[in-house]
Image (tube, helix red, strand yellow):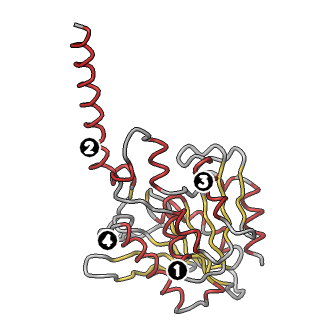
Amino acid sequence: MKRRIIFRWLKVIILVYCTIGIALYYLQDHILFHPSPVEKKFQYDFLSNATTELTIHYDKETQLNVVEFKPQNDTVTKGVVLYFHGNRNNISWYKKYASNFTNKNYEVWMIDYPGFGKSTGTFTEQRLYEYALQLYKLARSKYKPANIIIYGKSLGTCFATQLASIRDCKYLILETPYYSMTSLATHYLPIYPVSRMLHYHFPNDEYIKNVTAPILIFHGTDDGVVPYSNAEKLKLLLKPSDKFVTIVGGSHNDLNDYPLFHETLDSLLEK
């Protein structure tokens, strides 16, 4: 009798395990990406004389929306920040961060991934890297590498890191990065073979080794999305001149509220 009960419960556990695993495999795109699409004719309320909206025509299906934020004073622009945002909403959600750079006389070019905002098309991991490269090529038509800063936030840190690993830039700045998507998924799902299940591996750990530009990383100790311990492993891969800034008490989306974040960033941008 006991063996029957144990066997019955074992079948239930295996069934539940498999059901959850299958659901995670097929729903992972919905779990990872949370876009807010808008119509192409939609007018963002933040557009002004200090912003320009343009489209990168990648192919017939893929149109990438980019918003350029410009300094509002008449001083000479020092360069451009290519800003790769996180996995939610669209450019309108991240526009508030542009002033961190425009106040220091840098332009900020933010790009929406397909399905986000006005951008259309589909993507794979490789395609996302290619889209980042298209933005860089656009920037190179106006700026030298010594005047280009590549910035990644959360999900966008891998696009930024991969780009900086194959193209020259002034700095690579990462906000709340992960070691790799595989390691992050393993943290949350240790009982599943996530390396075989994931459509996206986003290996920051591999790309960061090939970045020759100075690297600055920000991460909070109370990050509930990308645990500090996961990002901290990137320290071992940094060059002696690179910096890993720990924001004590900082979480995933509030580092912009901490003086240390601005003091460190401003010091870098003033050079």
Disc 1 or 3, which lies upstream in sequence?
1
Inter-mark Cα distance, 2 to 1: 36 Å
Instruction: Categorize mark 3 by other alpha carbons within 10 Å: few (<14), some (14-19), many (20+).
Output: many
Disc 4 or 2, which lies upstream in sequence?
2
Inter-mark Cα distance, 3 to 2: 28 Å
Question: Disc 3, disc 4: CB below 8 Å?
Answer: no
Q: Circle 2 is placed at which residue position?
A: 22
- Report the amino acid beneath label 2: Ile
Instruction: Categorize mark 1 by other alpha carbons within 10 Å: few (<14), some (14-19), many (20+).
Output: few
Disc 3 or 4, which lies upstream in sequence?
4
- Report the amino acid beneath label 3: Ala
Q: Circle 3 is placed at which residue position?
A: 231
From the image, state whether disc 3 or disc 4 is nearer to you: 3
Position of residue 220 measured from the top left corner of the image (x, y, whole percent): 66, 49
* Element at label 3: helix
Query: Image quarter for residue 96?
Result: bottom right
Quadrant (top left, top right, bottom left, bottom right) of the N terminus: top left
Inter-mark Cα distance, 1 to 3: 22 Å
Q: Circle 4 is placed at which residue position?
A: 120
Q: Residue at x 53, y 69 (%)?
A: 207
Which one is nearer the viewer's eye here, 146 or 269?
146
Q: Circle 1 is placed at which residue position?
A: 166
Which one is nearer the viewer's eye here, 18 or 79?
18
Q: Is residue 8 left or right of residue 187?
A: left
- Report the amino acid beneath label 1: Ile
- Report the amino acid beneath label 4: Thr
Quadrant (top left, top right, bottom left, bottom right) of the C terminus: bottom right
Disc 3 or 2, which lies upstream in sequence?
2
Inter-mark Cα distance, 3 to 4: 31 Å
